[in-house]
Amino acid sequence: MKSLTEALFRLSPPGGIFNETVLINLFPGRTHGARELLLDRALKAGEILRLKRGIYVLAQEFRKTAPPPFTIAAMLLSPSHVSLETALAYHGLIPEAVYQVASVCTQRSRTFDTPLGVFSYRCVPTENPRAGVEAVALPDSFWAYVATPLRAIADMVYLNREVTWKKDGAFYLLESLRIEELDLRDLEFGRCMEIVEAFRSRRVKEYLLGMQKEFSHD
């Protein structure tokens, strides 16, 4: 076991994830170059994995808990929130297995292909990026920001620019996304206006208001 791996194993960071600040705290007397050498040796030995530059995780055999994918997504790019098909699957609204974690951000779209999975980010500009987003508790005291079903749908409508309420109505939800009608009628519309007001896109606003009129019990 390399020196850095041994020190991290004793520290046992949650989920085995750590950044450069942790390296500085573990080896305060070493120069930047010396710490980089320790990191490089552990990476080459396969004891540490790079998620992206500056963010790393202990290999599986050296960590006590596994980091939840949603938490990794939050650490790779902030601010962001888990959304789109990933959030809809998390809420049990779509049947498909989701093979990558899809998130939304206000920066340029990008994808991180890491040893722990693929994490994609799509740019969805809003006046309030946290509108319709909740902090969700995950196992082992982790947490992450996850879109509510309405926000996830709003994000998807924004990115699928050909979709409109006037042309598609609920067909997009029922046929393209394969959400059950009963599930749509069970959606919580209490934060609908918060999401509507956050979006600059008139098309998204009209789609959400059409959904509210069609499926809300109020």
Image: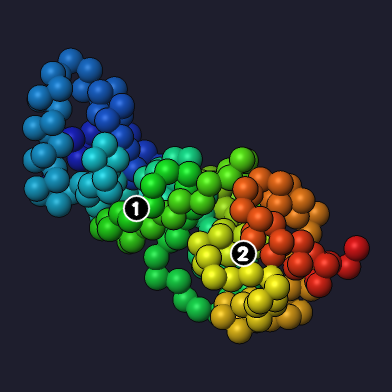
Q: Is residue 33 left or right of residue 61?
A: left
Q: Residue at x 29, y 40 (%)?
A: 55
Question: What SS does tag 1 mark?
Answer: strand
Q: Which residue is mark 1?
A: 110
Q: Is residue 32 left or right of residue 95?
A: left
Q: Which residue is mark 2?
A: 153
Residue 44, placed above or below residue 177: above
Q: Quadrant of residue 119?
A: bottom left
Rendered-image quadrant of the N terminus: top left
Q: Is residue 203 left or right of residue 1?
A: right
Nearest to the observer: residue 61 or residue 152: 152
Residue type of the residue flagged with mark 2: Ile
- Which tag, 1 or 2, sits closer to the chain's start? 1
Q: Residue at x 66, y 45 (%)?
A: 198
Q: Position of residue 11 (x, y in %)?
A: 32, 34
Residue type of the residue flagged with mark 1: Arg
Residue 100, placed above or below residue 82: below
Q: Position of residue 213 (x, y in %)?
A: 83, 67
Q: Which mark is residue 155?
A: none
Q: Position of residue 124 (x, y in %)?
A: 51, 51
The answer to whether any part of residue 9 appears in the image is no
The answer to whether any part of residue 185 appears in the image is yes
